[in-house]
Amino acid sequence: MKTTVKRTFILGLAMFISTLSFSQTNLKFQNKFVIVLDVQQEFTENSMSEISAQKLIDSVNYVIENTDPKKVIYVSDTTVHKVLNISFKKGFTIDTTLSKYDFDNRLKLVNENMFCKTGANAFESDELTNFLEENNAKEIIVIGLLAEECASKTLLGGKELGYDMYVIPEAIVGKSEKSKNKTVKKLKKKGIKIMPL
């Protein structure tokens, strides 16, 4: 009887410790909002190798899976496509169509918090800043593309607005690994917090 109680206690303790360490890992991103930036099919297919794209998607999905789903924000670059139409009656016309979102199909989508940006700094979107204000955001992690451009501009734009801004180097891509690392060091000097995956 004592052996059974002892085993049950040890098993229960082991499960509690396992759950505690698992939940601590999960809590790593829980109190922060996460902006998933420009992880769009057009960029992952045309600007990156398949290996680099998959590595980015895996890292980004890991962050998403370990974040409160309500605090994940997807931001896409609005890409303009022009189509030439030829008509015998009207002559030549150019139609401009706006492609919204077009996220990589491997990206884990956990909500409808989706916003478009037209410039490098995602905080120039009134819809995004209103959403963050309404949800009392204080700390924001930026992951996605591209370290030297949109990610940097968004991180610095958020800092300028008074947010505590974080970057996860393993979950962003740069023009090259060397260029990305150099950019991360510059961001750190400007007050952006570096958070390991």
Image (cartoon, helix red, strand yellow):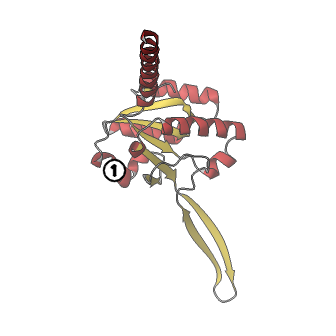
Q: Residue at the location (43% across, 46% down)? A: 73
Instruction: Check the image and name the residue furthest to the top.
Output: 2
Question: With 62 as the anchor, is 165 left or right in this view?
Answer: left
The image position of residue 39, as x and y in percent, is: 56, 46
Question: With 20 as the anchor, is 184 left or right in this view?
Answer: right
Relative to 158, residue 101 above or below? below
The image position of residue 110, as x and y in percent, is: 48, 48
The image position of residue 4, as x and y in percent, is: 46, 15
Instruction: Check the image and name the residue furthest to the front.
Output: 1
Q: Residue at the location (41% across, 23% down)? A: 20
Q: Residue at the location (34% across, 37% down)? A: 160
Question: With 180 as the anchor, is 194 left or right in this view?
Answer: left
On the image, numbered disc 1 is attached to which residue?
131
Quarter of the rendering occupied by the N terminus: top left
Circle 1 Cα neighbour tier, 10 Å, few/some/many (<14 / 14–19 / ≥20): some
Picture quadrant where residue 179 is located: top right
The image position of residue 117, as x and y in percent, is: 46, 53
Instruction: Check the image and name the residue furthest to the bottom.
Output: 89
At label 1, the amino acid type is: Phe
Element under disc 1 = helix
